[in-house]
Image (spheres, helix red, strand yellow):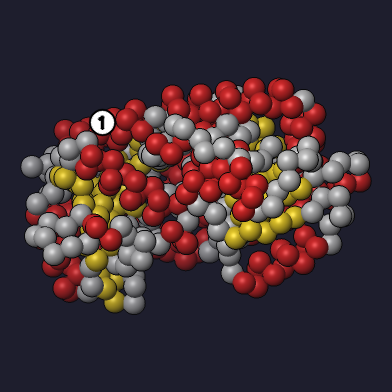
Amino acid sequence: MRIVHFLDHVDFRRGGPANAVTTLVRVLRARGHTARLACLSGPDLPTEWIDDSPAPTAVILPCFGARFLSPSGRRSLERLLEQADLLHLHGVWEPANVQAAGLAHRLGVPVIVSLRGMLDDWCMARGPWRKRLFLELGGRRVLERAATVHCTAEAEREQSFKWFPRGHATVVPNLMDLTTYAAMPGPTEARVAFQLPNDGVPTILFLSRLSEKKGLEHLFAALKLLAVRGHRLRTVVAGTGSPAYVDLLRREAASLDSCTPVHFVGHVGGLLKCSLFEASDVFVLPSSQENFGFVFFESLAAGLPVITTDLVDTWKEIEESGGGFITRQEAGSIADAIERALADRDALRARGAAGRAWVLEHLCTDRVAERFESMYRLALEHSPSSR
C-alpha cells in the first residue's frame, strides 16, 4: 500500500505523536509498504529520511505561521497524494489537517484520522469553546468524512465518538518498536549515571514531560503521607518542561521530608532509559489524561510495575497486564498503592514479569502492524472513492 502520513510537527518535545508516527512509518516501510511522512517542520526527523531522491521518506511542506499550508505546500502535498492510496492524518486541531483532508477528498484518496487523545474529555475541557468552534467550522466534517477515525484504546473511542457521531471509529493500539526491550541492559549504567546506591531503599520512578497534566504534584503529596507513615524512599524524576514550572516542582520537592528525597535528572532516553527502569522498583505516573502513554508500556516491557490513575485511557489494559496498580488521582490513594506495591517485593517482581510478558505478546510490533494493515485495507475496500 502507498500511505502518506501527515503530522504537523515532528518534534519529540511535543509528546508522543512524533514517536508514534515515525515508528509507524519505519515499520510499515520495513514491511514493504510505501509509507511517506509529510510535515510542516521536522526537527526530529531521521536525517536519512530527507534526501535529494525523487521520493524521500519525509517531506517538509512550506507553510504560513507553522499552522497553514502555503500554496506551494498545497501543491507539494497534492503531488504526494496523486501517488498515494491513503492519507493518514495525525491530530485534530491544526488547520493544515483540514487543508490536507480537503485535498485528499478532491483527489478521491481515502482519509484516516488518528485522534491522539485530542477529543478526550480532559482535553475538550481545556479551551472548550475554541475547540467546539473549530469542529463546527470544518473539523467535524473531516472526522465524519474519514474512512475511519483511529483511537488507541476503547476508552478513547467512548469519550471521543460524541464529537463525530456520524463517523466511524477503529481501535488499534500505538505501534511500538520493542527491539530494545528484548534483551535489557541491566541497572548498573543508570545507578552509576544517577548515583543510585543499591542499598535497599526503594526507588520510585517518574518519567514523562514535566507538565501539570502529568500529576507530579499528586505524587509529591503522596510522598509526604508516606514519610509520615515512616517509609524511606527515593524518587527519580526524569523529564523536562518549561523552566518556570520545573523551578516550581523543584521548590515543592525541596520541602519534602529528608527520608523521601527527589532527584531531578532531566531527559533520559535510549538504553539509559531502559537501565533506569531496571534500577527502579516501581513506576508512578498519576496523570490526568493519556490516550495511550508509551511510557506505561515501556515500563512494563522492562519488567517495572506501573502505578497510574483511572483517568488514563489505557488503565484497563494496564490492569489486565497484571503489572499495574490503578488508583484515584489523589494523594491518599497513590500513597496506598505505593505502600501496597512495596510491601511484598516477591509479589512486585512477579507483577513486573507478568507485565513484561503481556506487552511482548499483546503489543508485539508485528502483531500491531498487522492491525494497522487491516485498518488500511478496510478503509480502501469500503471507500467509494478508492482507486
Q: Residue at x 18, y 67 (%)?
A: 74
Q: Residue at x 57, y 53 (%)?
A: 208
The quadrant of the picture occupied by the C terminus is: top left
**Is 210 displayed left or right of 203 in the figure?**
left
Q: Amino acid at mark 1?
A: Ser
Q: Residues within 10 Å of mark 1 (few under 14, many from 20)?
A: few
- The image shows residue 270 at horizontal and vertical percentages of 47, 49
**Is 263 displayed left or right of 356 in the figure?**
right
Of 74 and 281, nearer the camera is 281
| Residue 209 quadrant | bottom right
Q: Secondary structure at mark 1?
A: helix
**Is 217 displayed left or right of 357 in the figure?**
right
Above or below 21: residue 299: above
The quadrant of the picture occupied by the N terminus is: top left
Residue that label 1 marks = 374
- The image shows residue 99 at horizontal and vertical percentages of 25, 63
Evaluate whether residue 89 shows in this view. yes
Q: Residue at x 75, y 55 (%)?
A: 262
- The image shows residue 14 at horizontal and vertical percentages of 46, 61
